[in-house]
Amino acid sequence: MGEWYRRLWESDAAAYRAVSMLLLPAEWAYRFVVAARGAAYDAGLFQSASSSIPTLGVGNLTVGGTGKTPITAWFAARLGRLGRNPAVVLRGYGGDEVRVHRLLNPGVPVQVAPDRVSGVERAHEEGADVAVLDDAFQHRRIRADAYVVLVAAEEWAAARPKMLPRGPWREPLSALRRSSLVVTTRKHASVERCEEIAERLAALEPDLPRARAHIALSGLARFDAANRCISEARPLSGFRCALAVAGVANPTAVWAQLAEAGTEVEKQRAFPDHHRYTNADIAFITEHAGRGPVLATLKDAVKLAPALPPATEIYVPIQEIEWEAGEDEVDKLLAGLVQKDA
């Protein structure tokens, strides 16, 4: 079962529509606060600080589900291949994303800091010469050198975007003007749908560089809890598991990708994003694990593996970033970042 607020945002049932209408005043109040805060930063009433090393902020306009973690990891790895010494700086909410970044890029330091300014400075002191900020678009106390904003095809609504708490949007589309590059992402949405949204964004902000990325599943890997690593890659097609677990912002996208790839799942179980697994949750998963392997997202595997019996087989989907359009714009943005202070 999805999170209650996901059902509120996505359901057409009369009860959810009624609740949504009751939340209109709260949405208006939220819009006002967001607009006032943005105006204060734009006018210099609230101060933004630059950092001593180049910084790239990766963020979005909605609550989760756009692929920030894999794309942030991709940028960090790419900067390393370009000869820089990157670090990832993030708030570290829930703890899972920190461990995921360390697994995806073992050689890249990860700094946990609610205050990104101090996090970047710590990273610099420890040898980093560029920082990638995970989920930092709304964290305006730091002034990054470039911002990549992700818009997920699966999260897009044709009507006027509903902001919190009536919908998943943290900021209106006009906030894209602060970005350096907008990336339309898709997981299970079609290429045509992604192109349609990219064209809509181009009409809204014609001068803003754009790219499109497919966050694809390229296979499965065995999660090794003892060594905290992933190994034994195998195809998705034909893989059978007793239970699939997803404690992410949009579990529907996970189920759709697995089904499309030909993975056979006996039972699905969705949990809230950054879920802290209880003893009851572990007992449920252990019971189903007795009938075969468990499939979990990487951010769930890092939390579940230490709590499950050692013999439990846990497999994680391997995500791969495929640039479908605008990779030249990505390269241009990174080239500017690499050359800064080089």
Image: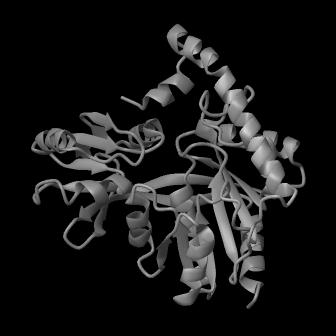
Above or below 102: residue 247 = above
Residue at image position (56%, 56%) is: 68
Q: Nearer the viewer, residue 301 or 16?
A: 16
Residue 301, quarter of the rendered image: bottom left
Q: Nearer the viewer, residue 10 or 165?
A: 165
In which quadrant of the rendered image does the C terminus lie?
bottom right
Residue at image position (44%, 42%) is: 257
Instruction: Locate residue 319, reporting x and y percent.
Output: 46, 58
Instruction: Locate residue 250, reporting x and y percent.
Output: 48, 39
Q: In this view, does 113 lie to the left or right of 139?
A: left
Q: Is residue 49 left or right of residue 320?
A: right
Residue at image position (68%, 74%) is: 55
Residue at image position (89%, 49%) is: 206
Instruction: Locate residue 42, reporting x and y percent.
Output: 85, 56
In which quadrant of the rendered image does the N terminus lie?
top left
Q: Can residue 197 be seen in this view?
A: no
